[in-house]
Amino acid sequence: MNKNSIVIGVDIGGTNTVAGKIASDGTCVQKINFRTDVDDSAAFIEALKLTIQQLVESSSGTLAGIGMAAPAVNAREGVIEHSANLRWGKLPIVELIKRHFAVPVTIINDSNAAALGEMAFGSAKGLKHFMTVTLGTGLGVGIVVNRKLMEGAFGSAGELGHMILETNGRACGCSRNGCVETYVSATGLCRTVFELLSYSMEQSILRGVAYEDLTANRVYDAAMQNDRLAMQAFTRTGHYLGRMLANTVAAFDPEAIILTGGLMRAEELLMRPTIESFKQNALSFQQKRLRILRSNFTDGEGALLGAGSMVQHWDAINEMVQTEM
């Protein structure tokens, strides 16, 4: 990639999508956010196409490629398949974007992209064994072992948001019950608020808010006003997250876990109960040596940079990936 080229990185989320223009030095110089149409894949592809065109037209550089990150990715086939939060079925997104742009187009699981972004530009510089946990509409995990990304046979390793946390628990978009992300995610937080409201007489700013109007940001704003029920919802979410991390660390033994995604706007509201719960549930020797860190990236920039790096540094990224692309 020469100095006059740009790469477009895209992070597709269950609520919002962010696309960014990445310069040759790895910095994101412009970003555009738009609402993800989770019900109409054709409308989403059209919105993404127009957004990429807008970014390219505002640049004096030549487009070198497009790297995308999304949940439920089959990287081998270039498709998003049956995501719990994107109701598109099996979408051949790489093929669809290539119809509009005659450049290399890649796609990677969003949590794997976040791991690559952290390894190249963020909190994981210098780490050999770490995990990223992305807390957004859902929950995903990127796993790096000996500085190699664990992708699995089809590029979908790290779907730990769909580990069963509670037997016969909350219904999940994956068609099962009790998955981690139904408790630990932006949507899971909102569900917890309504559970607390249903059996508590606690006064709350959130009482009377319709379910479709409730967002994680609204819960956060209430907590910042010392709303006890909102703070309790974050505490409960952190307790679930800490338990999930204890189980995950027992399996993978990382040096550090980096928490990222929109829910981490809550910072200590979520970090404190998460760390407390991890210490209560983890093996004693793992309690002391694991570091739980908050990503320094905001607005999905880590995943965006990681996705863009799949095009920008293709040879180097291939060396990081455990299985052949």
Image (cartoon, rainbow, N blue to C red):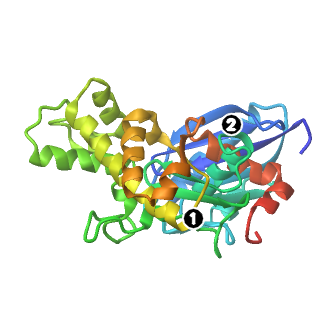
For label 1, the residue is 252
Tell us which disc is closer to us: 2 or 1: 1
Image mark for residue 321? none
Quadrant assignment for the N terminus: top right
How many C-alpha atoms fall within 10 Å of the one at disc 1: few (<14), some, or many (≥20)? Answer: some
- Horizontally, residue 317 falls left or right of residue 215, namely right
Quadrant assignment for the C terminus: bottom right
- At numbered mark 1, what does the secondary structure look like: helix, strand or loop? helix
- Above or below residue 153? Residue 61 is above
Q: Position of residue 94 (x, y in %)?
A: 68, 61
Residue at the outermost bottom position: 153
Can residue 128 be spotted in the picture?
Answer: yes
Question: Quadrant of the rendered structure where residue 156 is?
Answer: bottom right
How many C-alpha atoms fall within 10 Å of the one at disc 2: few (<14), some, or many (≥20)? Answer: few
- Horizontally, residue 111 falls left or right of residue 53, namely left
Residue type at tag 1: Phe
Q: Residue at x 11, y 36 (%)?
A: 202
- Horizontally, residue 9 falls left or right of residue 16, namely right
Q: Which badge, 2 or 1, comes first in the chain's sequence?
A: 2
Q: Residue at x 61, y 60 (%)?
A: 143
Residue type at tag 2: Gln
Q: Residue at x 90, y 36 (%)?
A: 3
Q: Position of residue 115 (x, y in %)?
A: 64, 52
For label 2, the residue is 54
Can residue 290 be spotted in the picture?
Answer: no
- At numbered mark 2, what does the secondary structure look like: helix, strand or loop? helix
